[in-house]
Amino acid sequence: MTEYVFILGKNWLLSIAELLVHLEDLGLEVRIADHSRNAVVVKVDQVLDNGQLVDIQSALGGCFKTGRVITRYDKEIAEKAFPVRGKIGKDARRILQSCPWVSEVWGKPKNKKIKFGVSTYPMVDDAPRLDLKRFTLGMDEWIKQKLTELEAKKAVYYAYDEPDKRDEKRPNTALWPATIARHKLLSPPNAEILAIFTEDTLYIGRTVVVYDSQLQQYRDESRPYVSAEISTSPKLCRTLLNLAGARTGDVVLDPFCGTGTILMEAAMLDMKCIGIDNNAEAVRGARSNLKWLSIELDQVIDYTIIRGDSRHASDLVNAAVDAVAFEPDLGPIYSDTPDRSEAECNIKSLTDLYNSVLQSVAQLLNHGGRIGMTVPVINSSEGQVTVDLSAMIDQTGLEVREMLPEEQVSGSATTHRRMAIRPGRRTLPERKRGQIVQRLLLMLERL
Ligand SMILES: C[S@@+](CC[C@H](N)C(=O)[O-])C[C@H]1O[C@@H](n2cnc3c(N)ncnc32)[C@H](O)[C@@H]1O
């Protein structure tokens, strides 16, 4: 088994679930070796080349960086070498300072001009015993020293970036993907070194590929039709496509296509797209977005957008479908918290809508095909109200497929409450603080 490391998005559990299902769909045997809230180390039964890792990273919505594990240390060594308080452990410093793994990353650095940077990811956002900033800069310095000893012509490092402007309180000791791209840190002999802390271990890794945030942002903001009210985020669209098991060449259906964000992400991955929406403006908008994307990519995109009611999807679509991914109508946009009976009434009618659509869509879906979808959770004045999944899939021939299966996650046991993974989840939340309507993601499979 070979170990790879993935840097997780804010919704760390969903990012892990998506990653596991995607790797399994690629025919890989995979299990988690270790994890934190910022990163996961997975063991895979095959050696993956850089091209395969690039394809994996670019298909994922939830992960920011993909890399290889180079070596590991007991976390205690780093805690002793860079304590927040108290005496510095000189032996621990010597162990980290020697960086024997540098030759594994750079081979023979002699006469090379090398740019690099260390990105450190703590176990959770707080790291009570370890001074992460000093640790990161210390590693930067020691790697530079080692490269100089090995006669590199030049060795310069880029220190970690400032915190994200949207979340300034969240400490940051990593380089942002944009910085990595700007300084070409992934073009050898340059490198980004990952330092990842889990409950007991410090993993040292080397990044192979990072998420292309600028490209996705450009697509999201520059397309001709976008609606702040209904558009789903492109990253969530990727996650839904992975839950649906959609692969290159597949026919993908979005029965609530709105502005077409899921279809655009599917088209980027060379899938054939079918969208349905009952709103004429959305249909026009989705068509103009797909046309725009085709011009931007200078590539023919196979897409059909149909105006109609998805409760009759099987009459509207004249093709077998490999995967279905969607964010349905999530009900009213509340300006005030609704009381429980109002929320229950809305959820009931949405459940009926989803059930009718799923009955019809399931007729188009190949056996063994999957659906990735969201359902709403309403935070009413008397607790949360959400869809009854059994009622939603009643008479559809669909089954809920569990995420985070026990056999894949059992290797990553932790005693840390905020990091525990409960296996076999039927749904996973996608939360934004303060929202009245939140979402759950789930995966259905046609028997
Ligand atoms: C949350 S939005 C989808 C957003 C979409 N993923 C995007 O990125 O723009 C839900 C969409 O479902 C459409 N819709 C609601 N009921 C429908 C139905 N019965 N059949 C087809 N479309 C429907 C709405 O018009 C709306 O565009």
Image: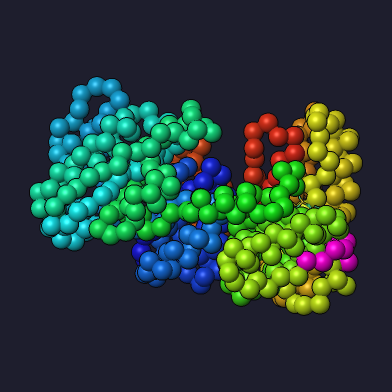
Left or right: 152 in relation to 291: left
Of residue 296 and residue 201, the one placed in the foreground of this image is 296
Q: Residue furthest bottom?
A: 319
Report the number of numbered marks. Answer: 0
Is residue 429 rendered magenta in the image?
no
User: Ligand 1 quadrant?
Assistant: bottom right
Tell me what residue is drawn at x 22 percent, y 52 percent.
114
Left or right: 108 in relation to 302: left
Tell me what residue is drawn at x 71 percent, y 43 percent.
228
Colour logic: rainbow
Where is residue 220 shown, x and y percent of the image? 62, 51
Quadrant in which the N terminus is drawn? bottom left
Relative to 303, say whether 195 is above or below: above
Any part of residue 217 in sight: yes
Relative to 247, say whether 119 is above or below: above
Where is residue 445 shown, x and y percent of the image? 70, 66
Of residue 121 and residue 147, the one placed in the foreground of this image is 147
Any part of residue 358 in sight: no
Tell me what residue is drawn at x 41 percent, y 68 percent.
51
Q: What is the magenta range?
A: 305-312
